[in-house]
């Protein structure tokens, strides 16, 4: 169901092996249907089984934790705020599962930034209690910023830090590398939330380019040639083969 990971090269390789990406389930089918790491709504799980597929749930443990925290808050009548990108599959699944448990489904809200929260500030102020969960790829700095804002307008605020530990570790290591580099090259899909966040963070420290494939380096020849120290990092879903190909290409430039 949906792209297994946000990397077009891996998806293409899987397709060649006979592992197909689908967005909707055929009415009847046989074989295995995989629920990817981003998770799905309970409704999708039921559909998969009702239509005759063998269900394999590969929802990431950390994503499942966010879903459970959001559902728990919704069941206890919190106004639930999910900090993340509304269109991202992980956030869609968190939201759907929370709404399923909510006493009032309208009390589950997805916000991509503080501006989105300000747009419903009166609703937040009127809520008896507010619960906050985060898309796993968010940054701790952003969490602190949002908590600082919400703590001033909420009667009761419960914060669940649901940032993926490996994402935080990757970001911290990349920031150290960026401080020693004239240029950072971030390798990974533009659709990958953890990769785009990584690029956004590093842009604040040093010159940063975000590419999906080594061939894109040709567009940055001048920047690369005038950089003494170049750091390379990648998103969680970027295969080693692509990272190594980028490093080899950099070496030739």
Image: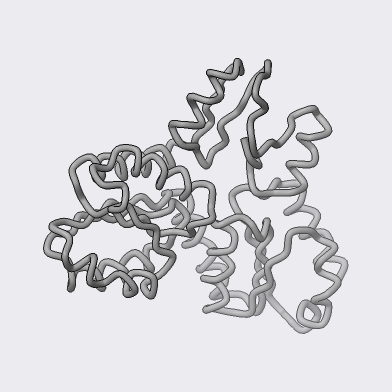
- Camera-side residue: 208 or 99? 99
Q: Is residue 229 above or below residue 93?
A: below
Q: Nearer the viewer, residue 165 or 49?
A: 49
Instruction: Look at the image and tell me in which quarter the N terminus lies.
Output: top right
Tell me if residue 215 comes above or below residue 204 in the rendering: above
User: Residue 167: where, in percent of width, then height?
Assistant: 48, 53
Taking 185 as reference, is 86 left or right?
Answer: left
- Left or right of 58? Residue 219 is right
Q: Residue at x 63, y 40 (%)?
A: 2
Residue 237 locus on image (x, y percent): 63, 47
* Residue at image point 74% right, 59% down: 212
The residue positioned 23% from the left and 40% from the top of the image is: 75
Q: Quadrant of residue 223?
A: bottom right
Residue 149: which quarter of the image? Answer: bottom left
Percent of width and height locating residue 147: 26, 66
The quadrant of the image that shows the C terminus is bottom right
Say which of 29 and 168 sits in front.
29
Q: How many marks?
A: 0
What colour scheme was applied to this rendering of the protein?
A: one colour
Position of 147 relative to 220 (above/below): above
Residue drawn at 51 percent across, 71 percent down: 201
Spot occupied by residue 65 in the image (x, y as percentages of width and height)? 36, 39
Q: Is residue 211 left or right of residue 207?
A: right
């Amino acid at each position: 169901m949906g792209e297994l990971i946000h990397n077009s090269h891996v998806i293409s390789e899987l397709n060649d092996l006979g592992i197909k990406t689908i967005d909707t389930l055929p009415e009847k089918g046989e074989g295995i249907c995989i629920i990817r790491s981003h998770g799905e709504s309970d409704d999708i799980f039921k559909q998969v089984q009702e239509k005759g597929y063998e269900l394999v749930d590969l929802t990431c443990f950390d994503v499942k934790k966010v879903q459970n925290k959001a559902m728990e808050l919704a069941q206890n009548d919190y106004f639930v705020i999910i900090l993340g990108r509304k269109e991202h599959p992980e956030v869609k699944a968190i939201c759907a599962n929370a709404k399923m448990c909510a006493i009032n489904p309208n009390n589950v809200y997805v916000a991509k930034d503080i501006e989105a929260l300000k747009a419903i500030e009166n609703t937040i102020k009127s809520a008896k209690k507010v619960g906050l969960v985060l898309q796993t790829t968010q940054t701790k700095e952003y969490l602190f910023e949002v908590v600082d804002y919400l703590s001033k307008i909420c009667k009761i605020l419960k914060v669940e830090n649901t940032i993926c530990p490996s994402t935080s570790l990757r970001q911290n290591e990349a920031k150290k590398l960026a401080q020693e580099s004239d240029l950072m090259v971030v390798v990974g899909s533009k659709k990958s939330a953890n990769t785009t966040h990584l690029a956004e963070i590093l842009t604040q420290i040093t010159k940063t380019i975000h590419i999906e494939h080594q061939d894109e380096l040709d567009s940055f020849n001048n920047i690369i040639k005038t950089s003494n120290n170049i750091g390379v990092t990648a998103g969680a879903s970027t295969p080693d083969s692509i990272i190594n190909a980028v490093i080899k290409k950099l070496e030739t430039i």
